[in-house]
Image (spheres, coloured by chain):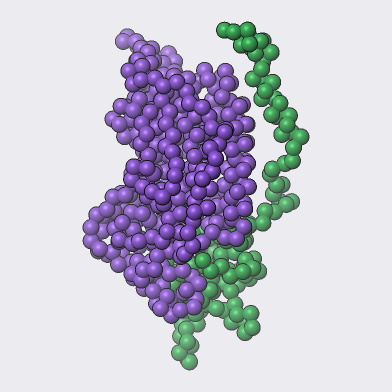
């Protein structure tokens, strides 16, 4: 063991070295954010809970009940009930997403041919009640306020 | 090409295979013939097992005589589940193998499916894939370091390495929309092109990460505790690796330059210029040095990918196998029909079998698909590196001390989600 090693051991050099880093970071800016007070803003591609979009002019839902999203969904959490109106168009009666099964893969948004279902920036989805995870059509329409500004093509 | 990074951790000594065997034998000598064996169970929810993993340890005092690893506590039946999904729907499943390197799993699966269906992936998509692989590698190695040092006794270290990983996580969110389960690779390419502002953010992150890594290296490399707990601990020679099918950094830290990125290039690795890092001491510290050097190498690769990325589509134009991009679906009726066919019917798959392996940050991840011509796989077999790392616990731990288990276990980098599937 050389003299330097002895001095290092006697002065607890490693501990001092470690503490100097601690001191440096204690004085520097915080990296984290205080969550409930401050909120992180997701990027435009963020995949939060789903929303059903309506036509801004007529107020009608974009969805024409084609069942594509229901079919592609890997966890089979979308349930759609549709009926035919007298004039031969399909109308959407029921649109339910079971959020407790959803894996947030975004496939429903990706395959939708009408840009009717989108993933939003809404990530605050925790709840004490399991029933809250069944998203109804009304909830999904109301959730459109969280939709990302630009429509995401890929 | 970027200049070589000065921070690169210098190589250690270069012992021969015989010397390594001798060192290992010296550790093994701690086990005496007339040992009084006591069997204890470690896990399944021991904090250092990174998931749920149980080992039955036969101990003689503090020396480990024998180990029986028990896996399967996290079994989710993924391979069986995959048989009931179309090839497109399996992609989110593969995310859940290993939640830190989701993209590598997505990509490995897609490579296998593309090989089966004979799809040509566009060049740009290949470069994006390579870049994402390296982002996975950086994120994984960074938190691996945090966990290693935490397991060796310094708990705050794990928290500060999460800060560096956060840069990569932000980039993931920007690129794919999710922080952990990306589901980003698609059959025939990737889901989306890189967004505006991504390059600048990436450049900033790649600026910070090497500086911080150098800082960590200064902190722990000459630390007495770290050296005492890592040097000549958990020696696993290249011969052992070959015998137990241990791949990835553990193999490269034993002096064998085996890397699928070079040996069987996938994505755009055949067009990229990079070195395979090798270390020779085959112990915990060699694995640490190797991973740090791999981070620097990954940074080099990402820079190259971003610089050399050609323009063009990010997903193949293939009406029979690929879900078309959303912007086409909204505009052209042909794409819409393709969309409907792909979703309701699934891709058209030839009969046959295919095996494809990719290099993830843990080792070789392979997918073996048997197709009977239907849009769902008849059998999907996933071969993950972590499973073999778990089984290698027995030869790795024999003759080591009880306190070194956590360091060795973390040193080979095991993820139980990926091991049990
Ligand atoms: S995000 Fe994925 S899992 Fe969730 S509803 Fe859409 S397709 Fe289904
Ligand atoms: S894919 Fe779009 S249009 Fe079709 S049912 Fe789903 S939300 Fe409606």
Q: What residue is at 52 percent from the left and 50 percent from the top?
A: B180
Tell me residue A128's x, y (percent): 61, 54
Tell me residue B263's x, y (percent): 34, 42
Relative height, residue A18 to residue B110 (above, below): above
Relative height, residue B16 to residue B242 (above, below): above
Using the rendered image of the protein, determine whether residue A102 is visible from the camera's viewpoint.
Answer: no
Relative height, residue B340 to residue A73 (above, below): below
- Specify the quadrant of the image occupied by residue B392: top left
Residue placed most toward the observer, B311 or B145: B311
Describe residue B79's horizontal placement relative to residue B185 as left or right.
left
- Specify the quadrant of the image occupied by residue B41: top left
In the image as oriented, which residue stretches furthest toward the right? A27
Q: What residue is at 39 percent from the left and 44 percent from the top?
A: B261
Tell me residue B308's x, y (percent): 49, 54
Relative height, residue A43 to residue B348 (above, below): above
Give chain A's shade: green
Q: What residue is at 41 percent from the left and 50 percent from the top?
A: B271
Q: Quadrant of the N terminus of chain A?
A: top right
Give chain B's shade: purple
Residue placed most toward the observer, B237 or B58: B237
In the image as oriented, which residue stretches furthest toward the bottom? A87
Q: What residue is at 74 percent from the left and 41 percent from the top?
A: A29
């Amino acid at each position: 063991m050389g003299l330097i090693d002895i001095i290092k051991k006697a002065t607890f050099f490693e501990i001092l070295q470690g503490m100097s880093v601690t001191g440096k970071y204690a004085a520097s800016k915080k990296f984290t954010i205080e969550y409930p007070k401050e909120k992180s803003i997701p990027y435009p591609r963020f995949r939060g809970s789903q929303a059903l979009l309506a036509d801004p002019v007529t107020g009608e839902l974009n969805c024409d009940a084609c069942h594509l999203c229901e079919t592609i969904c890997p966890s089979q959490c979308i349930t759609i009930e549709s009926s035919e109106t007298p004039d031969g168009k399909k109308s959407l009666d029921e649109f339910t997403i079971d959020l407790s099964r959803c894996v947030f893969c975004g496939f429903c948004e990706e395959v939708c041919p009408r840009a009717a279902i989108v993933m939003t920036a809404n990530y605050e989805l925790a709840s004490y009640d399991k029933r809250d995870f069944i998203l109804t059509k009304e909830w999904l329409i109301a959730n459109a306020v969280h939709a990302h500004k630009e429509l995401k093509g890929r | 090409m970027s200049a070589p990074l000065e921070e690169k951790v210098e190589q250690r000594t270069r012992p021969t295979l015989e010397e390594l065997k001798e060192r290992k034998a010296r550790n093994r000598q701690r086990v005496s013939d007339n040992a009084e064996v006591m069997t204890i169970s470690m896990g399944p929810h021991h904090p250092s097992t990174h998931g749920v993993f149980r080992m039955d340890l036969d101990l003689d005092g503090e020396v480990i005589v024998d180990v029986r690893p028990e896996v399967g506590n996290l079994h989710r039946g993924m391979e069986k589940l995959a048989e009931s999904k179309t090839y497109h729907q399996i992609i989110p499943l593969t995310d859940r193998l290993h939640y830190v390197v989701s993209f590598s799993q997505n990509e490995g699966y897609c490579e296998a499916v593309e090989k089966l269906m004979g799809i040509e992936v566009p060049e740009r998509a290949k470069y994006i894939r390579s870049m994402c692989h390296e982002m996975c590698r950086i994120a994984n190695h960074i938190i691996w370091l945090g966990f290693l040092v935490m397991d060796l006794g310094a708990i705050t270290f794990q928290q500060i390495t999460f800060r560096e990983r956060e840069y990569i996580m932000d980039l993931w969110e920007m690129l794919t929309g999710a922080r952990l389960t990306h589901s980003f690779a698609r059959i025939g390419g990737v889901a989306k092109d890189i967004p505006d502002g991504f390059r600048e953010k990436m450049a900033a992150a790649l600026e910070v990460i090497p500086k911080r890594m150098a800082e960590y290296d200064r902190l722990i490399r000459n630390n007495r505790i770290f050296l005492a707990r890592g040097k000549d601990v958990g020696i696993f020679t290249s011969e052992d690796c070959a015998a137990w099918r241990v791949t990835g950094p553990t193999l490269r830290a034993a002096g064998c330059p085996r890397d699928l990125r070079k040996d069987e290039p996938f994505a755009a690795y055949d067009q990229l210029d990079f070195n395979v890092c090798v270390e020779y001491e085959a112990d915990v510290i060699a694995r640490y040095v190797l991973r740090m050097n791999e981070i620097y190498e990954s940074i080099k690769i990402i820079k190259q990918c971003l610089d050399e990325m050609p323009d063009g589509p990010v997903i193949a134009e293939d009406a029979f196998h690929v879900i078309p991009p959303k912007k086409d679906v909204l505009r052209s009726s042909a794409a819409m029909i393709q969309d409907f066919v792909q979703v309701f019917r699934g891709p058209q798959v030839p009969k046959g079998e295919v095996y494809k392996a990719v290099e993830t940050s843990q080792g070789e991840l392979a997918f073996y698909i048997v197709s009977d011509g239907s849009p769902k796989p008849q059998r999907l077999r996933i071969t993950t590196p972590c499973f073999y790392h778990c089984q290698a616990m027995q030869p790795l731990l024999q003759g080591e001390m009880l306190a070194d288990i956590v360091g060795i276990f973390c040193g080979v980098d095991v993820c139980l989600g990926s091991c049990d599937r």
